[in-house]
Each structure stands twice: as C-alpha cells, then as structure tokens.
Image: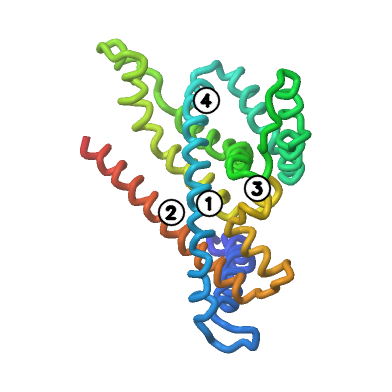
Amino acid sequence: MKKLTSAPYLLWMIIFVLVPLFMVAYFAFTDSGGAFTLANIIKTKEYAPIFIKSITFAAISTVICLLLAYPLSYILSSMKLSVQGTMLLIIMLPMWMNFLLRTYAWQALLGNNGIINNLLGLIGIGPFKLLNTQGAVILGMVYDYIPFMILPLYTVMAKIDKSITEAAEDLGCSKLQSVIKITVPLSIPGIISGITMVFVPAISTFIISKMLGGSSNLLIGDLIEMQFLGNAYNPNLGAGIALVLMIIILIVMAIINLIDKSDSDDKVLM
C-alpha cells in the first residue's frame, strides 16, 4: 500500500528531477554531434571570474538577509498570535506579485530619472548612478529573497519555549544575554535553512542581474541563459556551466549541513 501511494511522487521525481539532470549531464559531456568530450567542462574555467562574482554577490546578499531577517523574525515571534498573522501577511504580500514586475519596479525607483533621484533632486542632491551597479544587483537579491530567510527563522523562533528565556532572565541574564546564549543556539536550524533558501537562488539568478546590473554585472545565471537563448547558442557549453554550478551548490550545501550537524552534536553533548 505504501509503495502504491508513493508511486505518484516517485514518478514526479523521475520526470521532473532525474530526467532533467540526466539531460544536463548528457549535454555537458557531449559535443554538438553527440560524441563524448570534456571540452565543455574544461572551458568553464575561462569563466572563473564570473563564478567568483556570482558566489560573492550571493554570499553578501545572504549575509544581509540574515542580518535584517533575524531581528525582524525575533520581534515577530514575540508578538501576539493575532498580530503575527497580520505581519506575516504583510511580509508575504510582495511575493504574490510577479517576480519580473517587482524587478521592473526597482528599475523605476533606481533610474537616473527614477523616483529616488527625483526625491534627492528636490533637496539639491544627485542624481546618482543607482541603476546598473553592483549595489543595485545586491539590493534586488535582498529584496526578492529576504522572505525566504524570514519564514524559517520565524518558524523556529515561534517554537522556542518562552519559559526557557524567562528562566534565564530570572537567573540574572539580561535580555541581550538570553538572546545570545539561548535564542541564537536554538534558532540555528532556522538560520541554516534560511541561508540555504537564499544562497541557492541568489547564486543562479539572472533576471535581477540583467535588469538591475546591466551588461557590466554579468552573473553565472546570465551566462547560462546566453548559451541557450543568446546569439552564441551552445547548449552543450551551457549544460557544462550549469553542471559545474550544481556541483558548487552541492559543495556549499554539504558544508552547511556539516556545520549544522556539528552544532547539533555540541547541543547533545551539552
């Protein structure tokens, strides 16, 4: 009976996960004629600076999301239950809008004749070059992916027994000390989940970098898209780059899981 009920999920995994992965691997290790080759994988080293830039941007965006989301999630989890639902709705509301439209909105805000520069012009400042910059790309990543950091953090913090922190404060801990010594360690699973959920889409994004960063801020997602849709059509090279990117993501996730496991072991020993 269990095998029968799991059959639709296994079929889904085969069709939409295993088959696409096999196709990526096949194109990555073949040339246009279908012959086996390592040239596509070897050629990815030419794009090492783009890989490094993508990883750097994704890491910076993830750190900013964590720094912004952690206190917000803590405050949110401390509110009354009736208020928490309203606040979560406000946080999730932008995600109901199309991703492309949200990015277009930032173009209108950051352009040379955009809303921000027009407001600065009223007080005699600017205009500043805000669009087509690295800062604009990171800003777009943070804006679009911060809900993915808030939700796991809030979920974990909401489950922390308040009596534990109250007991710590009764024993002489200040509010800050109780947060550092109790809330932060207990919320590590949420931190790990949030980092994973933000870093993975951020490192492979292409719409944000294309619309807010311009041609001077090409990221690995843009490079892959160019191989499939651009003038330099080369799906084999695109698959090779995508395969290397997947390996990098898997390595990062493995490192994160090791950190999570070591923290869990430390908690057990304590």
41 up-or-down from 143: above or below:
below
Q: Nearer the viewer, mark 3 or mark 1?
A: 3
Crowd band around label 2 with a 10 angstrom C-alpha radius: few (<14), some (14–19), many (20+): some
> Could you tell me if the residues under marks 2 and 1 are in contact, i.e. CB atoms within 8 Å?
yes
- Label disc, if present, on residue 72 of the rendered structure: 4
Crowd band around label 3 with a 10 angstrom C-alpha radius: few (<14), some (14–19), many (20+): many
> What amino acid does circle 1 point to?
Val
> What amino acid does circle 2 point to?
Met
Label 1, on which residue?
200
Can you tell which quarter of the image residue 26 is in?
A: bottom right
What SS does tag 3 mark? Answer: helix
Measured in 3D between alpha carbons, the distance from the residue under mark 2 to the one under mark 1, in whole angstroms, is 9 Å
**Label 4 or label 1, whichever comes before in sequence order:** 4
**Residue that appears at 63% across and 53% down:** 216
Label 3, on which residue?
213
Crowd band around label 4 with a 10 angstrom C-alpha radius: few (<14), some (14–19), many (20+): some
Q: Is residue 20 visible?
A: yes
**Label 2 or label 3, whichever comes before in sequence order:** 3
Label 2, on which residue?
253
Location of the N terminus (image quadrant):
bottom right
